[in-house]
Image (cartoon, grey):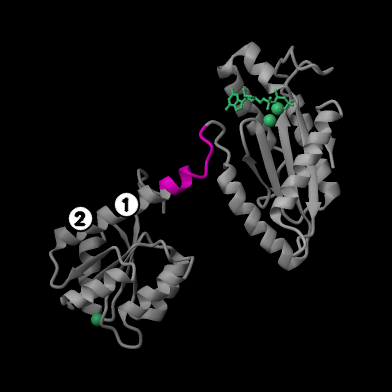
Amino acid sequence: MLNEGSKQKHTVLIIDDSPINIEHLAQVLKTDYNIKVANKGEPGIEVAKSQQPDLILLDIVMPDMDGYAVCRRLKADDKTRNIPIIFITTKSDTEDETRGLSLGAVDYITKPFRTPIVKARIKTHIKLKHNSDLLEKLALIDALTNLPNRRRFEQILKREWGRSRRSQSPLSIIMLDIDHFKEFNDHYGHLAGDSCLTRVAQSLTLPLKRPADSIFRYGGEEFIAVLPETDHAIAMTLAEKMRSQVARLLIPHAYTHTSHPYISISLGAATVIPSSRHSPNDLVEAADQLLYNAKNAGRNCVKG
Ligand code: GH3
Ligand code: MG
Ligand code: MG
Ligand code: MG
């Protein structure tokens, strides 16, 4: 999907009941695009879901299910909602075009079409889709550390809360914060602070081996990990691994007021089997309180 700039061709799905139309479109597009075809609505929807094309060219007049119905179905499904759809049809009434666009199609081309115009429009819409994907991605990533940000954390926590609640499995989070980081910035400078944050962020990812586990930059020098299907003992072990991973970076910090004159972190690990009696926010607050306890206990430690 995000293959702009690479050699890989984008994929265009043509849904049309007429073999002649499909053949004609495929002929003019195949040098620039990978072409997938379907001659009916239902198989077209299936191909869209499984192949995730970059754009769909959709006929309107088809037996069984017309293009409007196909469009409505594609827009109602999370898997296909964001794929741009261009209607390509002989129906040239204002009403038809208005209806097509109001269903969420990005464009409406009437037949007979002019090949260069169709190509230009497809190119524009794929480019726009690429840009909006990129923006969406960037909005969820922290620019300094490259970790997903707090907004992404809120999405993932909500999703994992729902999953764990349905499966009645434990959900853990680890909240952590760099010790005496203000002093570090004050003495070594903000640029050194930034580079320290990046290195800490990188090392925090190392103990998280399962694809379901993720870590986010929660705030300035605070990070938070979401660990689905993880009981408290495992969460504590992971938190301890994170602590030692950061301590092992041996980033000098002469003003840390701890016995370890290097950058260290304090962590709080909280676990819950989600139910209606708790909210995701309660879990975050519990981890925050435990982190506070770790700070009070002398820092560079885990509380759970
Ligand atoms: P504690 O051990 O209690 O957490 O003390 P602390 O000094 O780490 O806590 P405090 O919250 O007072 O200070 C956090 C500091 O983190 C303040 C700010 O200068 C620094 N900080 C936050 N975000 C960034 C950043 O993006 N870059 C840099 N260089 N510093 C940051
Ligand atoms: Mg037709
Ligand atoms: Mg701090
Ligand atoms: Mg802090």
Q: Residue at x 35, y 88 (%)?
A: 64
Q: Is 110 rendered above or below residue 197?
A: below
Which amino acid, mark 1? Leu
> Which quadrant: the C terminus?
top right
Q: Quadrant of residue 148?
A: top right
Label disc, if present, on residue 128 of the rendered structure: 1
Q: Residue 271: give x, y in percent of width and height.
A: 80, 51
Name the residue type under label 2: Ala
**Horizontal side of residue 27 vs 203, given as left or right:** left
Measured along the vertical axis of the image, is residue 128 above or below residue 64? above
Residue 302: x and y in percent read 83, 35
Q: Where does the image place residue 79, in percent across and percent down from the top left?
A: 48, 65
Foreground residue among 201 and 120: 201
Q: Are marks 2 and 1 in contact (CB under 8 Å)?
A: no
Is 111 on the left or on the right of 201, as rendered?
left
Which quadrant of the rendered structure holds the N terminus? bottom left
User: Looking at the image, is 264 positioned above or below residue 131?
Assistant: above
Residue under the image location 35 percent in, 43 percent down: 5
Residue at horizontal 28 percent and vertical 77 percent from the top: 16
Residue 250 makes an appearance in the image: yes
Residue that mark 2 sits on: 120
Disc nearer the start of the sequence (2/1): 2
Q: Is residue 38 above or below residue 214?
A: below
Q: Is residue 301 left or right of residue 219?
A: right
Q: Which corner quadrant of the figure contains ligand 2?
A: bottom left
Q: Nearer the viewer, mark 2 or mark 1?
A: 1
Tell me if the residue at label 2 has its CB under 8 Å from ligand 2: no
- Read off the magenta span: 134-143
x, y percentage for residue 243? 77, 32
Graded by Cα atoms within 10 Å as few (under 14), some (14 to 19) or many (20 or more), the crowding at tag 1 reads few
Q: Which mark is residue 256?
A: none
